[in-house]
Image: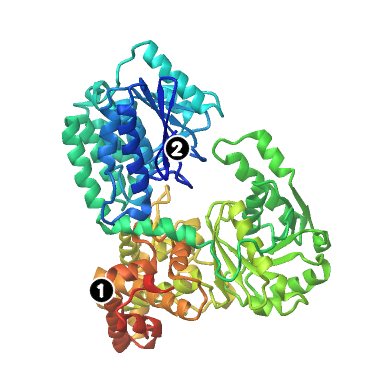
Amino acid sequence: MTAINDVTDYTLEGDIGVITLNSPPVNALSAAVRDGLAGAMAAAGADAGAKAIVLICDGRTFIAGADITEFGGAQKGASLFDVQAALEDSPKPVIAAIHGTALGGGLEVALTCHYRVAVPSARCGLPEVALGLLPGAGGTQRLPRIVGPQKALEMVTSGQHVPAKQCLEIGLVDELVEEGKLKEGAIAFAKKVLAESRPLKKVRESNEKVEAARGHPEIFADFRKANARKFRGFLAPEYNIRCIEAAVNQPFDEGMKTERKLFGELMTGPQSAAQRYTFFAERQVWKVPDVADDTPVIPVNTVGIIGAGTMGGGIAMNFVNVGIAVKLIEVKQEALDRGIAVIRKNYERSRGANPAQTEARMALISGSLEMEALADVDLVIEAVFERMDIKKDIFTKLDAICKPGAILATNTSGLNIDEIAAVTKRPESVIGLHFFSPANVMKLLEIVRADHTSKEVINTSMKLAKKIGKIAALVGVCPGFVGNRILGARQREAQKLVFEGAMPWDIDRVLYDFGFPMGPFAMSDLAGLDIGWVKEKSKGETIRDVLCEMDRRGQKTNAGYYDYDENRVAHPSPVTEKVIKDFVAKSGVNARHIADEEILERCVYPMINEGAKILEEGKAIRPSDVDIVWQNGYGWPAYRGGPMFYGDQVGLDKVLAKMKEFQATMGDQFKPSPLLEKLVAEGKKFSDLK
């Protein structure tokens, strides 16, 4: 065995040269790996005893992609293109031996080998689109030549990890070898290539599939149309499509130039910067500075949920999906039966519904009208009305019923959890687990740490969130916590803008164009304008009151802020416009035209400012946690990073200047956070906060 460098070895096994990479944790294409590969290929080329070459990786995976930490920095070591050329132009056949995942640059390396073998558990993909990028080392040019343009379009725009069996079917790998015997299988395949005098297959020269698609622009037009909604606002999917078009319509070398040009535009653009930021933020959010990863975890095998409504039922599904038994508590049998029936219906309607799996999951759910049924559960989650008196009453009872050590959690979206914990004799066991609706779909879980919550309860909650497939952010107690507190700042301005002359559809359009899935008024119509509205107490004091009194309660009545047709498509409403204009006239305000730019700044800059206040108060651990909350719970567009990242991109000096301008003309609701002022004075960003 010859050590090429710290991460690469070369050995001769019979007449097969074997290059082995070992750069934990995922053999990413760092400078050391590229240097090792270049050196090993030179050694194998010079070894007269080596008739063929196998490229294999130690550890849990084949090359799983580029080293993202090197992005944007100066090039060190051998270039990836030089390494690929050494593989592709080798006079000896080169076989990539794949286990784990061959992703991004890893698959691009494998595509420059003459053959590829894989174990059945392996997966291949080009997931750069998730980082706002496209494969920049020939992936968009070689992939369509081997799997065809249609499949290539699907792979590069979704980033899907294709299972080995499917890779064999589409030609991405040449042979599957026995699980656990990759090296032996790859060497045997290499010997077969030699024995049969197989050609040195260069993917770049395989033009049959791209030529067949030439002159058929409808392939791309149809693909764009079918995915328009999914790709809205994102540059990377469109740039990936253009690269596959180039593979079809241009010679290989020209297509490579197109790929490099478009890669460079994405790499230096704001969208990829935001998506790469999110990649790291999603890993940081799990780290709690004062709670060590080895902090003891409380075993959670059974969960009690109080309330079998939409929220309680959705929460229950998260746990039974991973095999944790759930006890649902309701006050009336009909409510309990209805809640369990809705859960069953959700499973039966889910894509790829499996009757046996549905029954297995439903078997994990039991119901009761007695809270005493929660005496032996490990975790209780209260999911009832947002009323402090009701929650205090429930927690007083739970304190008497639940076993010592059980975690007592509330799903409140903004009430004071310290006040709730104070009615128990075990405030250290009380925590907030704020799920987002629908709880079986939405990824975010705000975990709310109260003054006395123990580190064991925090660590258990974080680990449990990961187990049930959520992304969790640990936040502190304050009205609305992180997500709803920032939402409140936006909603306040949206409502004020209507009183000043903007129409609901103007505000919604600006925020939709910014990248949100819908604006605040469309969202209100979807949720129902009558949530929290009481007919008997309504005196027409707000626009919402007037609309509800007219039975315009949102989508469910086909009229709210908008009018809805039979397909629930929204249209600006003359009725709502008249209600607003009458209201504004009665209030004595002079309506004015409000430009889109002001709408965006009025809605978004106060969110950034509120986030700064949250950080200043220590209610979020880091700015990126705020952004994770907003991306995963409120539809902030991934390609804009989150309110704190967006503030940095716009320039905190610009945000501060606007907040001061608004404060001078509209009052102290726009008063800048001291942290915002401090950062600007010091020439720093949110990203500089440690």
Residue at 34% from the left image edge and 27% from the top image edge: 147
User: Which amino acid does the dot numbered 2 rest on?
Assistant: Phe
Residue 320 picture location, percent across and down? 68, 48
Residue highlighted by disc 2: 62
What number is the disc on residue 539?
none
Q: Is residue 352 above or below residue 590?
A: above
Query: CA–CA distance between discs 1 and 2?
Result: 55 Å
Residue at 53% from the left image edge and 76% from the top image edge: 538
Residue highlighted by disc 1: 594
Looking at the image, residue 473 sits to the left or right of residue 38; the answer is right
Looking at the image, residue 146 sits to the left or right of residue 387; the answer is left
Residue at 68% from the left image edge and 71% from the top image edge: 454
Quarter that holds the C terminus: bottom left
Looking at the image, residue 181 sits to the left or right of residue 3; the answer is right
Q: Nearer the viewer, residue 590 or 353?
A: 353
User: Which amino acid does the dot numbered 1 rest on?
Assistant: Ile
Would you identify the image quadrant in which residue 195 lies? Answer: top left
Residue at 57% from the left image edge and 69% from the top image edge: 413
Q: Earlier in the sequence, mark 1 or mark 2?
A: 2
The local secondary structure at tag 2 comes to: loop
Q: Nearer the viewer, residue 267 or 371?
A: 267
The local secondary structure at tag 1 comes to: loop
Q: Is residue 358 above or below residue 185?
A: below
Instruction: Name the mark nearer the viewer: 1 or 2.
Output: 2
Residue 681 picture location, percent across and down? 30, 84
Look at the image and tell me whether residue 492 can be seen.
yes
Please rate how many residues cluster around mark 1, counting C-alpha atoms within 10 Å: few if below 14, some from 14 to 19, many from 20. some
Quarter that holds the N terminus: top left
Please rate how many residues cluster around mark 2, counting C-alpha atoms within 10 Å: few if below 14, some from 14 to 19, many from 20. many
